[in-house]
Amino acid sequence: MNLQDSNPSHDVIIIGGALSGSATALQLRRKDPSLRILIIERSEQFKRRVGESTVEISSYFLTRVLGLTDYLLEKHLIKQGLRFWFHNEKARCPDSCSEIGPHFNVRLASFQVDRAELDEHLLETCRKEGIEIMRPAEVKSFELNEGTVQKVTLKRGEEMMERSARWLIDASGVVKLVARKSGWVRRNEAHPISSAWARWRGVRSWDSKELHQRFPQYGNRCYALRNTATNHLIGKGWWSWWIPLKGGDVSIGVVYDERLVQPPEGDKPADRLRGLLYEHPMARIFLEDAECIEGDVHWRRGLPYYSENIIGDGFALVGDAAGFIDPFYSPGMDWVSFTTANAANLILKERQGMAQPEDYSYRNQLLTGSYHRWFRAIYENKYFYMGDWELMKLAFRLDLGLYYLGVVSQPYKHGEEAFNMAPLNGPHTDFPAWLITLYNRRLSSIGKARMKRGTWGRRNNGSYYPFVSFTLDYKLTLRVLWALMAWGWLELKEGWRSWGKAVHAD
Ligand SMILES: Cc1cc2nc3c(=O)[nH]c(=O)nc-3n(C[C@H](O)[C@H](O)[C@H](O)COP(=O)(O)OP(=O)(O)OC[C@H]3O[C@@H](n4cnc5c(N)ncnc54)[C@H](O)[C@@H]3O)c2cc1C
């Protein structure tokens, strides 16, 4: 050990100062104010980015763990749940397109956030709470040394410099610096999805009086606010999100499964994105007078990936730097919540001299295993059925009900401690993981069989499922059991045709 090893410049160095980096720093510093933490962020200012919709877990994390409730209420929008819109050859307008969505406004808090604004606020909060920030500065390389001192080389302006710490946190997002340079990154080959998105101006409001008058059935059948929900227009093998941002811009993007969707060709990314969206008749109505904001159109192929290692004695990968599955149901910030909380807890345990050698491998297995189970349970081959109203309605009742039962209920019962675990992995998770994987697999097979028989999407016109938001009480279990019975009935009516058949794209 040389002098620098025995006397590192910091206790924790964090690469990347967006949500994951700031969230890790704040959790650490608030529990141990003696920690010397350095955040290195390469951008001078955050630009708008995707990741704008929170769900129940990430909302709990932002409000009750990070303490942002008042800030979120002031600067962002309260979200009114998830809403799905389907179409077929008979569905041409909001009156006739089938809909799934909350009938009344929702019960638990969630938000539509402008990430540039939120991430800037969090980084500024870090600065105010005594965390050192170097910005703009870019980490160029690093050296991981298990159990001792980690080193980074960074560039600030024209100057190269070195810093060292007992812990290195990688919060570099899709750059995934540590995993990439360590050879740990793997593509999720079983899930070939890609995405295109932009922020738009001039999008028609889902709650406008003019729209309600033009489409009275649409106007009258639902009592909730629709405009501040995350609206999803869905088709065969693709879906789109419509997320309103405070101030009037709307984030709209498409995610598609490359096995099922060939995006339109063209030179202009904005026109290609519009072309994808225009497959759904409602997009033409809502985007009639809308334009993408100049310079803010993005395409990303091959979205999902994972790191073979996430945490060890001296390093942790958090948020997107650790892996990414799929933005459907907005799980990104849930993953940020769990990975940052696990990293912070392990570091604090090590600082108190209480970490055992097996703690590192246990947590690594917990988080890497959670990625794979979460993917297989909820997302694998989902694009074969998500655009079919009947099948998606059933999946939505089960996916959301079990998310409430097994995940959302936990912090409300146990407080912050609940983030020190990982979804669908760890004690008591084998059965739920198996069950969710099973019904999603079956729904994919039924979706595929419907495509072959030409019955896929038969209820995509003229149906409305007025969903009543879940509550954290005895009714939740009953409603999940009821949905499981509906699945059983579907198997008897129709599912038997595809028993034993695998799902693939031909
Ligand atoms: C299409 C799409 C839609 C999504 N929608 C949602 C959604 O609705 N809800 C949701 O919860 N999640 C969503 N997500 C996921 C969400 O965007 C991410 O989970 C979240 O932004 C991750 O935050 P992060 O802080 O880990 O990474 P980022 O936000 O990417 O931040 C990484 C930071 O690291 C910095 N950095 C990188 N390299 C270096 C370096 N070498 N040196 C210094 N700094 C560096 C960058 O400048 C950046 O500020 C979506 C993702 C995609 C792809």
Image: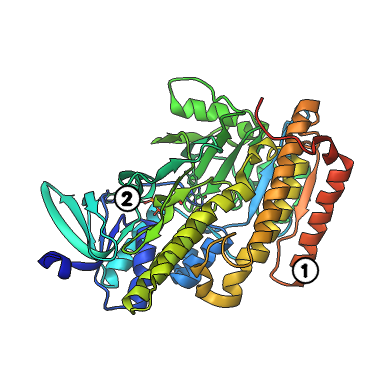
**Looking at the image, what colour scheme do you see?**
rainbow
Residue 225 in the figure: left or right of residue 195 = right
Residue that lies at the very extreme toward the front in this rendered image: 357
Residue 149 in the figure: left or right of residue 359 = left
Q: Amino acid at mark 1?
A: Lys
Residue drawn at the location 24% of the way across and 71% of the way down: 36
* Residue corresponding to mark 1: 475
SS at mark 2? helix
Between 441 and 478, the one lying in front of the other is 441
Name the N-terminal-most of marks 1 and 2.
2
**Which disc is residue 178 wearing?**
2
For discs 1 and 2, the disc positioned in front in the rendered view: 2
Residue 298 appears at what percent x and percent y?
A: 43, 35
**Looking at the figure, which quarter contains the C terminus?**
top right
**Looking at the figure, which quarter contains the N terminus?**
bottom left
Compared to 114, does 420 lie above or below?
below
The answer to whether mark 1 and mark 2 are in CB contact below 8 A is no
Quote the CA–CA distance across marks 1 and 2.
45 Å
Residue 431 appears at what percent x and percent y?
A: 69, 60
Residue drawn at the location 45% of the way across and 64% of the way down: 363
Q: Amino acid at mark 2?
A: Val
Q: Quadrant of residue 256?
A: top right
Residue 427 appears at what percent x and percent y?
A: 59, 67
